Image (cartoon, rainbow, N blue to C red):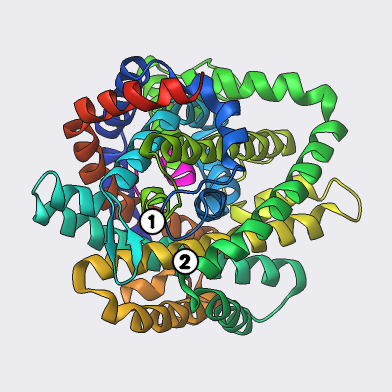
Amino acid sequence: MQQLLDLINVLNGFIWGPPMIILIFGLGIYFTFKLGFIQKYTFKAIALSVRKDAGEGTVSSFGSLAVMIGATVGTGSILGVTTAVAEGGPGAVFWMLVAGFFNFVIKYCECAAAVKYRVRRDGEYVGGPMYVMARVLKMKWLAVIFAVGTLCMALSAGAALQANSIADVLREGYGLNPWLMGLGVAVLAAIVTVGGVKRIAAYSQWLVPIMGAMYLFIALAVIAMNFSRVPHALWAIVSGAFTGKAAWGGVAGVSVSALFTAALNAMGLGVSRSVMSTEAGLGSAAIAAAAAKTRSASKMGIISATSVFWTVFICLLSGLVIVLAGNWQDPNAFAANLCNSAFKTVPYLGTPVLIFSLIIFSFTTLIGWSYYGEKALQFLGGGKWSMAWRIFYILVCVLGGGLGTAFSLGWHIAPDAFEVGLSTRFAWGLAVLMMTLMTLPNVYMLWRLRHKLQSETKRYLHHLMK
């Protein structure tokens, strides 16, 4: 398993090194200037997200946004930040924030395009990058690659990783059997996902605010209890962005090339985790946006982009809390263990609230990705496979609870055979690799649509926000 993990890390290190940094940052900077810094509309868009829209669609715009936030504000916002800090140092948090700023406009573009070119199929509105690639760019083969990537991400990062995260948290916190927890997660997922996007949106609308409020409360409590150390932690995040983990504890004896390599590693981890956490550039959220009731593609695009704001805010809190804990340098402290060491400083409430937050975060991500995967399969083979997909997805949740993402490779290994840190790193490494199959086609699509998106934005968005 270690050898395969090393191979995956080599591939991810190359793809999510300079090539992807240039693509994501470059595209975000380009659209930021071309569209007139639409990030300035963030708070107006948040207010707009809770208003009803009489336009056509399957679910309300807020319901669609709740699905996006539920799917994005998951373990990527907690465990993803944790692994990024553990592997790249506090500086990874800085690059997550920078990438998040530009990801806002990328999320707007991909969701606006999805709504503009959505279609009515099997009685509901559907869309997303695969439909745009096939219908507008006339590149069916690229659409197929994106759809297959979505299926792989849904099964690995959606079903297996989230179910395994829930089971792992409950095993660490209360010693519960991970197989039974995987079964419990599957039963709850079945109750929600069998109802399709309407039921997923309905559950997300009340789960998302609850999970956000609870996590915000406990994270701020940790920060308040360590308030005197906050400036030091913030400086570690900023300085670490340009020196990397290798320079932590002093730069004496560290070569310039080592500093540059470490800083580049922190940047790559920050960008990849930002894409995974916000899903901007990934294109998945556009699938949910296409189902929204709206009269304007630009309006739904800017509402969708607010999910990036909420996700980045939670990532910042997570990163700050983890750096404050001080043991991110421990090579044996990963995932829930590293988070728990920070949150348990809050007497009585810290660990239980963290566990509950991780469970809810993971569950909303799990049900959101079940919808994304279903729509990708619908694009590839039609709606006749929807029920078969839901059943298979639920089975993966059961197996994911006990086996983690190793199931996706066909391995049948007892849970005790997994070393916690290794299995967690493997799960995230595989998810990042699968994410590439979605990100590259989606980025290319957005570049090809740049003039249409600029025209759409100038025509509708700036007038809407006045």
Which badge, 1 or 2, is on the more N-terminal residue?
2
| Residue hosting label 1 | 431
225 relative position to 373: left or right: right
Q: How far from the left and from the top, in percent, is residue 162?
A: 53, 64
Q: Residue furthest front?
A: 54
Residue 162 visible somewhere in the drawing: no
Q: Which residues make up the magenta segment?
A: 274-283
Q: How many labels does the image show?
A: 2
The correct choice, above or below, for 187 with respect to 198 in the image is below
Mark 1: give few (<14), some (14-19) or many (20+) Cα within 10 Å: many
Q: Which residue is drawn at 23% across and 43% down?
A: 440
Q: How far from the left and from the top, in percent, is residue 152?
A: 31, 64
Mark 2: give few (<14), some (14-19) or many (20+) Cα within 10 Å: many
Q: How far from the left and from the top, in percent, is residue 133?
A: 17, 48
The image quarter containing residue 416 is bottom right
- Element carrying mark 2: helix
Q: Residue at x 50, y 53 (%)?
A: 64
| Residue type highlighted by circle 2 | Val
| Residue hosting label 2 | 197
Between the C-alphas of marks 1 and 2, the distance is 24 Å
378 within the magenta span: no
Residue 301 visible somewhere in the drawing: yes
**Quadrant that contains the N terminus:** bottom left
Q: Residue at x 72, y 60 (%)?
A: 355
Q: How far from the left and from the top, in percent, is residue 153?
A: 36, 60
